[in-house]
Amino acid sequence: MTSSYPARHGVLSNFTSFQQPVVTDSELQTAAQMFRQAGYRTAAFISSGLVLGSHTGIGAGFQTFDPLRSRAPRIASETVKVVTDWLAKQRDGRFFLWVHFWDPHDPYSPPPEYERLFKSDPDVEQYVRDTGVAERHRSEAVEANNLYDGEIRFTDHWIGELFRAMQEHGVYDPGLIVLTSDHGEGLMQHGNMHHSDLFNDQLDIPLIIKLPEGRGQKNRRLQNLVSIIDVLPLIAEELDLPFAREQFDGLNPLRHERSFVIAEQQRSRKRPGVRFNFILRDLEWKYFLYSGGDDRLYDLKADYHEINDVIDLHTELAESMKAELLRQLERHRRSGSGLEVNEEIPADVREQLKSLGYVD
């Protein structure tokens, strides 16, 4: 929504976890605020009032913000019904619309007709073994994969219904549409059923973009690295919108290639006492910087599921990736986004982060 790293915007958790609201100011605007200033109507329809309710501040810039007063999630079919009702009232397609679905998420409980749609088979069982799931958790992981797939299939159907409604109202073909997500699920990889780490099973997300009819190359699959912060620059550049591009940390992946991506996570549930961790990855390697020490390095070409830490075999590479990560954090940091001091942070790392303004 801002094309800015947490190191810049300072929002380090969702409201549910640590009561931290989304705060925007004149120096940092959300997509909705930029679209509204550009003369677009703005609307958001969410499926989780607990995580994305108006109390979180995420509604800034939206003229229509579906309040969803219930804290219980709303299923995709109900959200699409509300959105299609809104679409029917629009006089033209000059709008920015955000539709949020919750269904592919824990707890894994798809509607009854989708609950047993996917059954265990040798491919699923082999996948669970290949991704390093401990033997004692494999049957649980297989079941979770099947239920999660049911949730995805249910949501996929209702996204199709939304697209059909857009076609009926004449806004599908001329529209720019982005389908993406905020995270994946562990499904017992690395001992994590849900999502609280920076492993690939949780960082890899769908990103499908439909450009307006007649623009761009169809059916193109990019092989380069892309980050979710690249979505807004793509929209701004492909539609030539007057957005505040100086705040963008991302780039348009249709016209530029990035050499690496970074990500960060606060207060890991899986690593008690660890206040934060960061990763830097390129197409071949991925480096983890943990506040509690125990940094890691994975060879993604040989070990994409990040099972074997090889940092002891490639110490120079790990140090160079660490240096690059720290340079990037310094580049993107803005005041007010500091981390709490934690005495468990190794002294050398604490000094490095202190020099960047991350800790007092």
Image: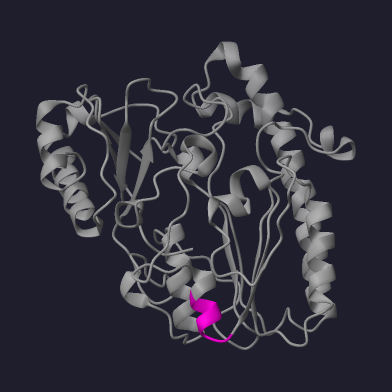
The residue nearer to you, when weighing 275 against 259, is: 275
The residue nearer to you, when weighing 208 against 180, is: 180
Q: Is residue 66 above or below residue 192?
A: below
**Residue 121 located left or right of residue 20:** right
Q: Is residue 113 above or below residue 182?
A: above
Dominant secondary-structure state across the stretch colored magenta:
helix
Q: Is residue 174 above or below residue 138?
A: below
Figure quadrant of the C terminus: top left
Q: Position of residue 246 (x, y in %)?
A: 31, 75
Q: Magenta includes 277? A: no
Write the residue at 43% across / 80% down. Answer: 243
Residue 193 falls in which quadrant of the image?
top right
Residue 285 falls in which quadrant of the image?
top left
**Residue 80 located left or right of residue 327:** right
Q: Is residue 37 above or below residue 326?
A: below
Write the residue at 74% across / 39% down. Answer: 72
Q: Position of residue 295 (x, y in %)?
A: 24, 30
Residue furthest to the right in view is: 113
Q: Magenta includes 36? A: yes
**Residue 152 located left or right of residue 5:** right
The residue nearer to you, when weighing 324 against 99, is: 99
The magenta segment: 34-39
Residue 173 falls in which quadrant of the image?
bottom right
Would residue 285 be visible to someone looking at this image?
no
